[in-house]
Amino acid sequence: MNEELLAYWKSDECDGTTLWDCSGHNYNGIIYADWNPGYCLNFDGVDDYVDFDTHSEDLGYNKTDDYTISFNFKSTSSTKGTIYSMSHTNIARAFAQLELLADGRLTYKTGDSTSLLQVNSTGTYNDGSWHYAEVRFYGEVVNPTIEIWVDGSKDGSITDWLAPFLSEDFKTAKMGRKSNEEIDYFDGIIDEFKIYKWLITIPKIDIEGPSMGKVGIKYGFIFTLSPPQGGWRVNIDWGDGTSETTGFNSSGYVMVNHTWTTEGIFIIKAWAKNEDGIETTVATHKIIIPRIRASSYQWYHWFLECFPFLEIFLHKIYLKN
């Protein structure tokens, strides 16, 4: 059992009217709808939802906790829908709601009748594509912070004072609708829904290697994961139509070689993904394979280092030619 993982509901782990918790805590939900095998979290936006009321206090959190929700979702809805919700039967006591708004933005709000902390995403995600999202609540400070991350990038953040509340204040918990009212049903698909009682630490990936090169020469690049963590693999897009995936060593880095067969300006992109499907942000590194004679290569490199402000201008001339 992963001690940090509080709950884990997989779309393919349901049987009849039960949505099984794969975290080992047995926070199983009761399904109120007709579900197709393999698509048990396909909500119709009318009356589909999953009930976790029996476990609401265990799934709840204190204002001083670090708490993370992660999930995959897909929707084309233009109506506000609740993805996940917890509250007291009297919402003035405590609540936490994760919603997809009518305009496609994600929103997360928590608090009670005396204070509210709410953050909205900047981007819109009701485009019918799969998205991976996280809501991170940093509560172990005087003024908590809530962040929304979508597809590996932070897309919303707020920090402010919040009145104290306790996990036992949460008496209801639902997926697919508001927890204490039969409204705001979600229209879309939810998959791989996880709750962590401690913050997920997502590492950063960096790329080190040459910024200039020649056609047909093999160059080595070091991809570093910091802090080092097990179970991650790096995905590399070399910018020339080729890509590869490899693992890190125990020190959190790996060296990978690549050869370019044509001249050009290439943007290397790299991101890491772990066994739970969590991804880092994308790191980039530019390498130039210029149309110059080998004898001019060293001079050209020195020139750009001395006059970096001319680099963009020279690149434009290069691309036109």
Image: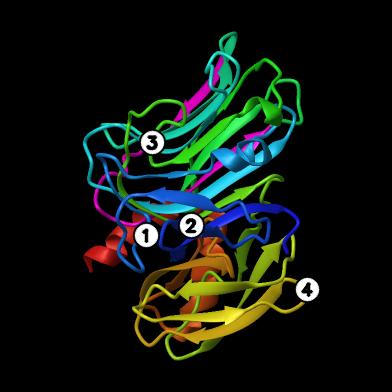
> Where residue 155 appears, x then y in whole percent?
46, 39
Q: Is residue 161 above or below residue 169?
A: above
Q: Earlier in the sequence, mark 3 or mark 4?
A: 3
- Judged by depth in the image, the label closer to the viewer, 3 or 4, is 3
**Residue that lies at the very extreme toward the top in this rendered image:** 114
Residue 62 is inside the magenta segment: no
Q: Indicate the amino acid at tag 4.
A: Ser
Quadrant location, the C terminus: bottom left
Marks 1 and 2, Cα distance to the nearest angstrom?
8 Å
Horizontally, is 214 left or right of 264 in the view? Answer: right
Q: Is residue 209 above or below residue 9?
A: below
Residue 41 vs residue 211, the one in the foreground: 41
Residue 143 vs residue 57, the one in the foreground: 57
Callout 3: SS: loop
Q: Earlier in the sequence, mark 4 or mark 2?
A: 2
Q: Indicate the amino acid at tag 3.
A: Arg
Q: Residue at x 34, y 68 (%)?
A: 37
Which numbered marker is on residue 40?
1
Q: Tell me the residue that label 2 is attached to.
A: 19
Q: Earlier in the sequence, mark 4 or mark 1?
A: 1
Q: Indicate the amino acid at tag 1.
A: Cys
Callout 4: SS: loop
Q: Residue at x 32, y 44 (%)?
A: 48
Q: Tell me the residue that label 3 is attached to.
A: 177
